[in-house]
Image: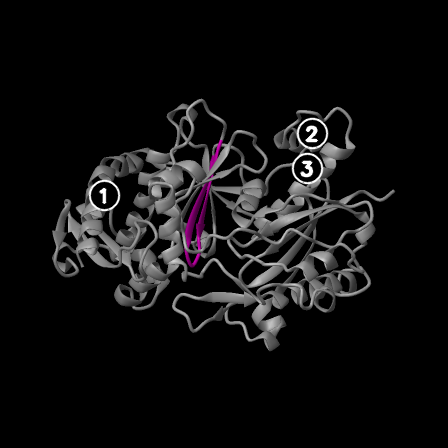
Amino acid sequence: MLPPLFLGLDLSTQQLKASIIDEAENLLYEEYIHFDSDLPHHGTQNGAHYGDREGEVTCPVVVWLEAMDVLFDRLTEKHSVDFGRILAVSGAAQQHGSVYWNAKGVETLAKLDKSKGLVDQLEGGFSLDRAPLWMDSSTTKECRELEEAVGGAQNLADRTGSRAYERFTASQIKRLYDYDQCIVAPFTGDNPSSIVSLSSPGDAILSLGTSTTLLVSIPPSPDPPLCTTNSHMLAHPTAPGGHIGMLCYKNGDLARKTVKDKHCGGSWEQFDQSIKSTSSGNDGYLRFYFPMKEIIPDGVIGEFGFKEGKLVEGEGEQFKPSYSRAICETQLLSIKSRLHHILPHSIGHLHRCIVTGGASANETILHLVADVLDLPVYVAATSASATIGGGLLAQYAWWKATKEGKEGKTFEDMREEVGATKSLKKVLDPRKHESEIYDAILPVYEECEAKIIEICKSK
């Protein structure tokens, strides 16, 4: 008998991706369908349709169905995948795309014909032809009503782990082809799936992409992590009693590019050199950049400069600051501040920070990550963390179901048994003196941020 394989799927905003791994976590096959380029007849832009109503962002459900059909065709025709060896399937989906089935669709699901595609079989099976995406912000009124119903945003965060956000949804895609003798394990979100793939309890994952996202794998502890109105708290998919803390920032790479174009002649080399030519703390100059209305802190927009905690009019050229250093330091100090408030004291210091996204290739920025957060920095060997996480969830379900004596055994027990190691490369250690500088700056940063919030509220 050939050794088993495990399939992980990730339905993200712009593509559907598949990864197939073996028991040793070797990545054997990888394939993706890019919605804009592979399915251009649906007219998506970056995987989405932008509606006439303010804040409305959707995707036709048929795009996802057709992507699934084409993906499995490619796995068969291009890679000659033996689906009989796939013994479990799991995966992740974008947070927070929601699909609304009707009675016809639910009935059809119970009798799908594996010899036919999903598009033809599920036509007319949905109450809404277009699924709202995570970028949709058309439900502000409903969010406020939800918060009011439970006594405010903080009460809702205490009860559920998050306040009400426009992009939140009630359901995700959870149905797949049902191959004979194949376990279909519960799916999770793309962010928790990345946690499964890349980290262990006590680790942080920092995604430096178009947006900035921090995920923290919080182990079980006597004192639970703190829920706030600026963060999210999720149940950990593989560590019972554990949590995932999540921070999502809208102004990530966009803000850094704004600084690069405005102050560094459009050159990333000049951007990096500006950081290298100045010292940690930027000689007391902090500058905040919010080109778009931010989520953390909520609702702030604009540019704000401070010297030794005092608001500075204009761009503060008289202080000869590094604007490149300023944008990176304030973005990372925001994360440091919130980690300080969220994490239970009983778990101690985090172990490491795994950095992903486009900026993970920039060693200058990685030095700042290590120093500001006071954590050793690692990078991942693959960008397929969400799909590999899905494959690992599938493997765990199969391992528990087919191996004797696995009652009460954990996900980490499985990884130890099979001798698996995460595909991570250590890049940098924090520098003690630099980290101490940022510890000292943190209270000043928090005072400056509070002033910005008040300024924006008064506008």
Is 212 colored magenta in this rendering?
yes
Disc on res. 445: 1
> What span is colored magenta in the figure?
203-218
| On-image quarter of the N terminus | top right
In three-dimensional space, the C-alpha distance between marks 3 and 2, rounded to whole angstroms, equals 12 Å
Residue for point 66% across, 25% down: 408
Task: Check disc 1: other Cα within 10 Å, few if <14, some if 14-19, many if 20+.
Answer: many
Helix, strand or loop: magenta stretch: strand
Q: How many marks?
A: 3
| Amino acid identity at mark 3 | Tyr
- Secondary structure at badge 2 equals helix
> Relative to residue 26, is residue 3 drawn left or right?
right
Task: Check disc 2: other Cα within 10 Å, few if <14, some if 14-19, many if 20+.
Answer: few
| Amino acid identity at mark 1 | Tyr
In three-dimensional space, the C-alpha distance between marks 1 and 2, rounded to whole angstroms, equals 45 Å
For mark 3, what is the residue? Answer: 396
For mark 2, what is the residue? Answer: 417
Residue 359 lies in quadrant: bottom left
Can residue 367 be seen in this snapshot? no
Viewer-nearest of discs 3 and 2: 3
